[in-house]
Amino acid sequence: MRQRLVVVGGDAAGMSAASQARRGRGPDELEIVAFERGAATSYSACGIPYWIGGVVEDRESLIARHPEEFRERQDIDARIHHEVVAIDTTSRTVTVRDLVAGRERDESYDQLLIATGATPLRPPIPGIDAEGVLGVQTLDDGERVLAELQERQPRTAVVIGAGYIGLEMAEAMIQRGLEVHVVTRDACPMATVDADIGERIAAAMRGMGIHLHLGAEVESIRTDAQGRVEAVVTADGDLACDLAVLGTGARPFSDLGAEAGLPVGTSGGLVVDRRMRTPVEDVWAAGDCVETFHRVSQRPVAIALGTIANKQGRVAGINLGGGYATFPGVLGTAVTKVCGLEIARTGLGESEAHEAGFDPVTTVVESSTRAGYYPGAGRITMKVIAERDTARLLGAQVVGDEGAAKRIDVFAVALWNGMAVDDLLNVDLSYAPPFSPVWDPVLIAARKATQAVEAARG
Amino acid sequence: MRQRLVVVGGDAAGMSAASQARRGRGPDELEIVAFERGAATSYSACGIPYWIGGVVEDRESLIARHPEEFRERQDIDARIHHEVVAIDTTSRTVTVRDLVAGRERDESYDQLLIATGATPLRPPIPGIDAEGVLGVQTLDDGERVLAELQERQPRTAVVIGAGYIGLEMAEAMIQRGLEVHVVTRDACPMATVDADIGERIAAAMRGMGIHLHLGAEVESIRTDAQGRVEAVVTADGDLACDLAVLGTGARPFSDLGAEAGLPVGTSGGLVVDRRMRTPVEDVWAAGDCVETFHRVSQRPVAIALGTIANKQGRVAGINLGGGYATFPGVLGTAVTKVCGLEIARTGLGESEAHEAGFDPVTTVVESSTRAGYYPGAGRITMKVIAERDTARLLGAQVVGDEGAAKRIDVFAVALWNGMAVDDLLNVDLSYAPPFSPVWDPVLIAARKATQAVEAARG
């Protein structure tokens, strides 16, 4: 009997799952319908700051695949401007609002995949909804920022938040020729790395001419007579601006699932098992809206990141297509850059390691991206966190010049396999002068971490 | 009682070992003397092609540490222009020739480390010793090539051999403005990668204007009346040139140890145990002159590479300093570039996997170094070799634009840990548009390899 799969959310997790399910089951076996409330399927939200900064040419480049392509190539019925507003797991129906026609109707499902993504955090402060205060979550948000840049020729922008999106938007605004202020309540930019690495990022950002306001809580948005932002008001003082950008992070948009009675975990994400099933029969969830397993802390985490959403969508889709796959968890790997500075992390930071109950030993090592004598050798700082008693790698952080950040992947694979730093230091990594010093920075860091662990054991 | 450590060979392995031994045992416990027949200690042989090409400014930059520094900082007596010509393991002495004074004397040891490196292979053809036929193994070799370039203003160079050194010398000669011919008996450049990857390298090299002569055995060197090279004679015809460069590889220089009765393995390198001990008491060996264990094929191999020599020197030095360390083997990882083309490999190639007795399934995948829409996204081709029955990764090869080659390290760590490709595809690698597509090329390759293995199992 032909079954019907309904996918709620037409971006990374949802459409990966739909495509993968189709590979397992043809149109005779499985009807696939995907509802997306926005104007596009399968777009790269991560690319929006680069589009705003003018590095990526147009909106279209950020769209990996259109609804028509899903229909024609895979017989997947992807409907944009369709919002699922309620789920009834008893009658196995979803209520869908056609945002263009303004109508609602119920649609039945045999299998349901919730892939509703994340929703940006908007600090609950007076004036947050003023004109000229802009988010950068969706393609439409991106259009809005670009329109403001073109029509108003702003000269000063305040970026609220100094996480990945905050930093990427600071870079974008600099590329657009604006004076840029970044304000955060945290003591350092990039709260996802440890403070000692954050301080290096702060110094580099100031060197780029970015005005950095650290430990500064935003109290309100001050507006002019027309209701438009004219300053971001902080405990530290008012930051006059023509534009304010919200880079304050996101939380799992688990609300729709929660309202249908699905359990939400401590991280705020929907609870799923290894195959991406919720506890309710035939209801699955994947992507930014779920919580997942952190392989080092062994705790649930919610991480909004396209690469994880794609992998989880693949796993859900294989299972929905009649196959078998499990999602093995995450390491919290992430990478970003702000102008010439590359930043990356994986596993646990020093403070996270303590929180998770580990006894960590940390090492910070400076080295070089290429042989010291080879032109273009850049600086690279690596922090390694290892467990005192076992020398097991717990995490790593990298900050440096071009060629620095992607080296985090070596640590990621080592972490994935539970390697100790004294094993890692011997790994046969590639070497030639244009690519690394004879001891690759990762190996130098592992060697120093080994010495630090030995010294700490006394 | 104070012991005496004699080190034979003052480059990567020898001086790493000496330094490390000194950390374990101070000058009161251990006297350390190192004999080096050349003019420099601890220099980067791998950097010589870049110095010749003018990318690296001078000879001095390639020297990591001078004898004076070893003496002053670590009380290590490093003597250049001193060649050990014989070892007597019964009387525990070495015969040392002072190459400047022309004298020989015996020196006693309590512990001996043989780190005599590799010696270039010189094809036994008529004219090989003619003027203008140059090797690039030592700093003095480099000086000689540079002198020829300056004094003779050659217009055409023939590089004999298309391995790492051959390719790097081809790049160097192009950078010096010469017309470059590369001749090799192999069907493809880079015999250390599989033919399908080699063909891509050949095409790219021809695109750079390099004249590539494949499957062409060199028969002789034709000289002029003054005994200077005027052509490289091959079965394919004569290649007229002003300069010929030998890039025909190297073999372990195990001769000195062998003459002293130490066993030599099938690879041509001295046989050592996990701690870098030869079977003769108190005689150790490390670096290019030894044979080591390949972790995937589980066979002995001899690989002349600074990064391995440094690691082995460290292990020998820890043991000589009273500590405990073992060398865990190699993966055969290597990286190089020829102009804009990056090339890397790790583990076993397809043919090597067959030779080692595996039943391999291979996959070749094209992808992109960055998100497709991000400027500067380069092409990258990855070949993955996996075991049919277990999906275990056996090896990988990469060829591509800038940012491609260093990704081999991710495969190297995966190989080190014996990962299967269906586990590797889920690893939480870093992603942001300037750094990779949302599925990193390594993950795409692992995913396709997983599909290939499943298909091959039928």
Image (cartoon, coloured by chain):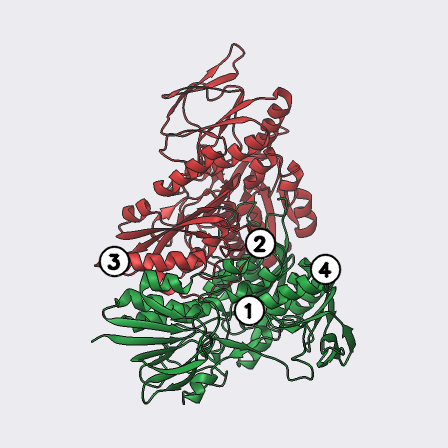
Chain colours: A red, B green
User: A120 or B442: which is nearer to us?
Assistant: B442
Q: Residue at 45% of width from left, 35% of height from top?
A: A249
Residues marked 2 and 1, same chain: yes
Residues marked 1 and 4, same chain: yes
Residue B362 at x, y percent in the picture: 60, 70
- Which label sits on residue B140? 1
Chain for disc number 3: A
Disc 1 and disc 4: Cα gap in Å?
29 Å
Residue found at the far front of this picture? B101
Q: Which residue is mark 3?
A: A455
Please state, as top left, top right, bottom left or bottom right, where the C terminus of chain A lies in the image.
bottom left
Disc 2 and disc 1: Cα gap in Å?
33 Å
- Which label sits on residue B403? 2
Discs 4, 3 touching: Cβ within 8 Å = no
Q: Which residue is mark 4?
A: B208
Q: Residue at 61% of width from left, 50% of height from top?
A: A31
- Residue B52 lies left or right of residue B224; in this view the side is left
Discs 2, 1 touching: Cβ within 8 Å = no
Residue found at the far right of this picture? B237
Discs 2, 3 touching: Cβ within 8 Å = no
| Residue type at tag 3 | Ala
| Residue type at tag 4 | Met
